[in-house]
Image (tube, rainbow, N blue to C red):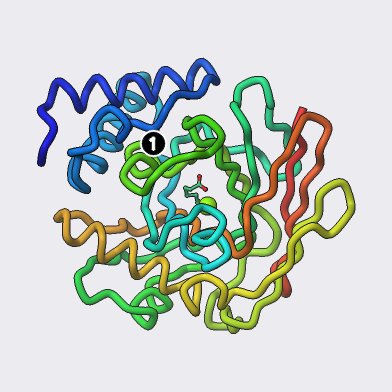
């Protein structure tokens, strides 16, 4: 690691304040170009510690930048991993307050819920499917704390991968009943289709994103516990939203979920 604990704590506090106050900042590698990957995840860990100290709980985990469309959109080439706290959860069909966010975008995703723990290294799609209780449609609302969504990978990892809100809903089904590679999705904004895709857009199979998360955690001596909700990553590019927008994700065989921005 290149950053000392005081700097890590200060950077985590800066990003957490930006999220709480819904204001943006410049990317942290501008000030700390020497920071490494461990520093980036240490800042994310410190943000989690701050949230837990405020009484929040972990509601789920996420993989991000898992599709070519997302990597191309953001100019990066590697998945990233983060967490969601319980204050991020929007009820299915519920409201998301724009005033609490900076410049939100939505991503259509397949959400997994595990029934047994998953631990890397060596985790693979087969292990993920065996450990999955069910899958269901999920929309992630991302809201980078960086000005104009301009960041590099280390900065975005430190910023908990832009996580801000999520909704899941529709029909929960066992993954064994579905071919998650060919499953089709349509994302609608205000009743108009705005993005389309299939599960294979996410690393060839959405379960590969969950395996990558387990392998990432395994390198850090951690695992995905049983009963964890995990967002596997945007199937398409993220779509910007504003107050008044209504967003629905329809997933083949899994029904739909959605939320309104007010
Ligand atoms: O969940 C995601 O794919 C987002 C990862 C962070 C990059 C971004 O803000 O688009
Ligand atoms: Mg996402």
* Residue bearing the label numbered 1: 159
Tell me if residue 149 comes above or below residue 115 in the rendering.
above
Q: Nearer the viewer, residue 154 or 229?
A: 154
Q: Is residue 23 left or right of residue 216?
A: right
Label 1 SS: loop
Residue at image position (54%, 76%) is 175
Dot 1: within a 10 Å radius of its alpha carbon, few (fewer than 14), some, or many (20 or more) residues?
many
Q: Is residue 180 above or below residue 219?
A: below
Rendered location of residue 14, percent (x, y): 35, 20
In percent of the image, x 81 and y 42: which residue is there? 246
Badge 1 residue CB within 8 Å of ligand 1: yes
Q: Position of residue 248 (x, y in %)?
A: 77, 52
Vertical arrangement, residue 40 with respect to residue 64, above or below:
above
Question: Is residue 255 visible to the viewer in this orientation of the structure?
Answer: no
Residue 250 horizontal side relative to residue 13, left or right: right
Residue 249 shown left or right of residue 52 in the figure: right
Q: Position of residue 39 (x, y in %)?
A: 19, 40
């Amino acid at each position: 690691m290149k950053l000392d604990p005081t700097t890590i704590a200060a950077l985590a506090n800066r990003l957490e304040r930006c999220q709480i106050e819904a204001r943006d900042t410049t990317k942290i590698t501008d000030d700390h170009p020497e920071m490494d990957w461990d520093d980036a995840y240490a800042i994310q860990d410190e943000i989690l510690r701050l949230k837990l100290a405020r009484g929040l709980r972990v509601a789920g985990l996420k993989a991000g930048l898992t599709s070519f469309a997302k990597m191309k959109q953001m100019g990066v080439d590697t998945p990233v991993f983060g967490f969601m706290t319980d204050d991020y959860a929007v009820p299915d069909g519920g409201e998301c307050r724009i005033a609490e966010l900076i410049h939100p975008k939505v991503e259509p995703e397949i959400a997994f819920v595990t029934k047994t723990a998953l631990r890397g290294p060596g985790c693979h799609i087969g292990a993920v499917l065996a450990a999955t209780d069910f899958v269901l449609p999920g929309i992630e609302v991302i809201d980078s704390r960086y000005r104009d969504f301009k960041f590099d990978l280390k900065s975005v990892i430190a910023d908990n991968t832009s996580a801000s809100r999520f909704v899941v809903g529709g029909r929960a089904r066992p993954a064994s009943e579905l071919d998650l590679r060919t499953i089709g999705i349509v994302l609608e904004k205000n009743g108009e289709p705005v993005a389309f895709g299939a599960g294979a857009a996410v690393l060839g199979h959405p379960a590969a994103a969950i395996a990558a998360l387990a392998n990432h955690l395994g390198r850090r001596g951690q695992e995905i516990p049983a009963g964890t909700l995990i967002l596997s990553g945007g199937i398409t590019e993220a779509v910007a939203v504003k107050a008044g927008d209504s967003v629905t994700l329809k997933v083949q065989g899994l029904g739909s979920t959605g939320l309104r921005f007010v």
